[in-house]
Image: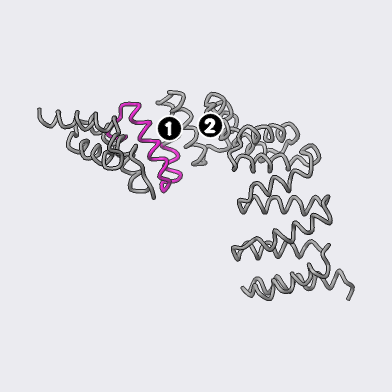
Amino acid sequence: MNEDHQLKHLVKKAREFQSMGNYLHSVQILTSIINNYPEYTDAYFQLAEIHEKLGNINPSVNYFNNYLEKYPANKEVRLFFGKYLLKNEKYDEAIETLSYFMPEEEPDIAFLLGLAHFKLQDFEIAKIYFLSFLTNVNDTELRAESFFMLFKIEIGLNNFEQALSYSKRIESVYNRNWEFNYLLAKTYLNLNMFTHAITPVERAARLNPKESLIYELAGRIYFKTCEYDKAEKNFLKFLETAEETNPDIYLNLGESCLKLNKFGRALDYFKAVLKIEPENQAAIKGAQIAVNKLKE
């Protein structure tokens, strides 16, 4: 049995152990391969998969770093490792790993670097990489995803006019995506295009009814369109579904109830705000209005 065939046989055996849940034996085989045949990359890839399943990727990170010190120009390993780091939210390390190549050499690098910088909220740098990617790649799926990322970046930069422009380029692709519709509604809200915001926020709620942020946004939109009953309903839905809340929600509920002449309920919401923020002037003013209305 030649050496390459023997190594493939060992990797296959390790995968069989992995499929049976016997990770220890699989790790032992793969680690032995790496120690004795450090250039054999298949063992690194499979070991990385196991470490990820076990919730501890640090050993694989060390193995990949050691490998790339010896073979820095191996594009396959560097791309795999960069994606692996991104997937496991190690964005700074991903940037360091992927920056070895120029984006012009490997266009996918620009996309991945853009994604890493976006996750770090380095929006301006992320924007440069995605625009660079779009000038060098014709892949339809990744181009659409890049425009989606640019849409999100412009929102992050509060450039809502530009965000709306990007949204038009991908609306047909992402029309059934809840996040796209949520962000589109948010864009319209910030452009004071309140009526336009209703359709996408309602679609987002239908597509992902468990996402609490949608109801908070819907409440704000309906408040702006003077549909106060719908605003109240959505703010309450937010309270039902959110893991955490903030005084602004109770303030919004209080103001909605004032508009609906539900003064007792409004007062309760303003008091809830004041328990958290005793100096909140909007809540103090709202509570006083509610008290005066109850006395009439």
From the viewer's perspective, is the residue at label 1 or at label 2 nearer?
2
- How far apart, in angstroms, are the residues tagged by discs 1 and 2? 19 Å
* Rendered-image quadrant of the N terminus: bottom right
Which numbered marker is on residue 155? 2
Identify the residue at image location x=74%, y=50%. 79
Does the stretch in magenta take in 73?
no
Characterize the magenta stretch by its predominant secondary structure: helix
Could you say where residue 182 lies in the image, as x and y percent from the top left?
A: 47, 37
Amino acid carrying mark 2 in the image: Ile
Magenta residue span:
202-231
Identify the residue at image location x=89%, y=73%. 2
Q: Which callout, 1 or 2, points at the residue further toward the start of the chain?
A: 2
Circle 2: element type = helix
Identify the residue at image location x=74%, y=73%. 29
279 lies left or right of 118: left
Residue at the disc numbered 1: 199
Q: Is residue 174 above or below residue 160?
A: below
Could you say where residue 246 lies in the image, as x and y percent from the top left?
A: 36, 42
Circle 1: element type = helix
Few, some or many C-alpha atoms within 10 Å of disc 2 (few <14, some 14-19, many ≥20)? Answer: many
Q: Could you say which quadrant of the image residue 223 lies in?
A: top left
Does the stretch in magenta take in 203?
yes
Amino acid carrying mark 1 in the image: Thr
